[in-house]
Amino acid sequence: MKYGQVTLLLITAFFASLALAEDFKTINGKEYKNATISRVEPDGIILRTKTGITKVYFTELPKEVADKWLAPVLAAHQAAQGKRIEAQNAAEREHAEKGVVSTIPIAPSRCCCRWCSHPVGGGYR
């Protein structure tokens, strides 16, 4: 429940900020006037201006601007990752309680001889 409330708060703040038009200036000096952010991706933001749509990478933006838009993306990613880890741990606990052997494959260690490339070993944990 707590993660859901935090995620909802972040999403609400994120979409509220998308509607506002801003001026952006890259570290190379390129300016985007009266631009609205249509989407934030893990590696940059998609800007919509009167001349068209452009992707500006976080590495091209000043640090304070990049951090402003990257923080909600990272927070949402961490929340999702936390949920995945919790679900995986719950499934592993459930399997351990039932006595089920895990079906996570183990990577093969080596080939059986020096000249061929077929794997040997492996199996399941």
Image: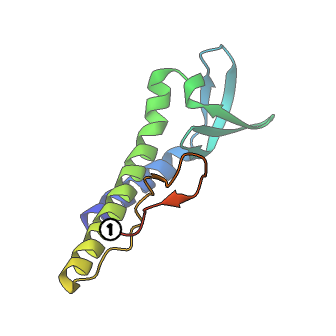
Q: Quadrant of the N terminus?
A: bottom left
Note whether 74 is above or below 99 in the view shown. above
Relative to 5, does residue 67 appear above or below in the rendering?
above
**Looking at this view, is 92 or 37 the one in front?**
92
Which of 26 and 19 lies nearest the eye of the viewer?
26
In depth, the one of 96 and 34 nearer the eye is 96
Q: Sort mark 1 into few (<14), some (14-19) or many (20+) by Cα contacts within 10 Å.
A: few
The quadrant holding residue 29 is top right
Left or right of 73 in this view: 30: right
Q: Quadrant of the C terminus?
A: bottom left
Residue at image mark 1: 125
Looking at the picture, tell me which residue is in the foreground, 14 or 28.
28
- The residue at the far left in this view is 97
Amino acid bearing label 1: Arg
Q: Position of residue 86 (x, y in %)?
A: 28, 65
Q: Position of residue 108 (x, y in %)?
A: 45, 57
Q: Position of residue 78 (x, y in %)?
A: 36, 50
Residue at the image position 68 percent from the left and 27 percent from the top: 33
Q: Total of numbered circles in the picture? A: 1
124 with respect to 114 (left or right): left
Identify which residue is drawn at 22% across, 74% down. 93
Query: Residue 5: percent from the left, percent from the top?
Result: 31, 62
- Please give left or right for residue 102 compared with residue 112 in the image: left
Residue shown at the point (26%, 79%) measured from the top left: 95
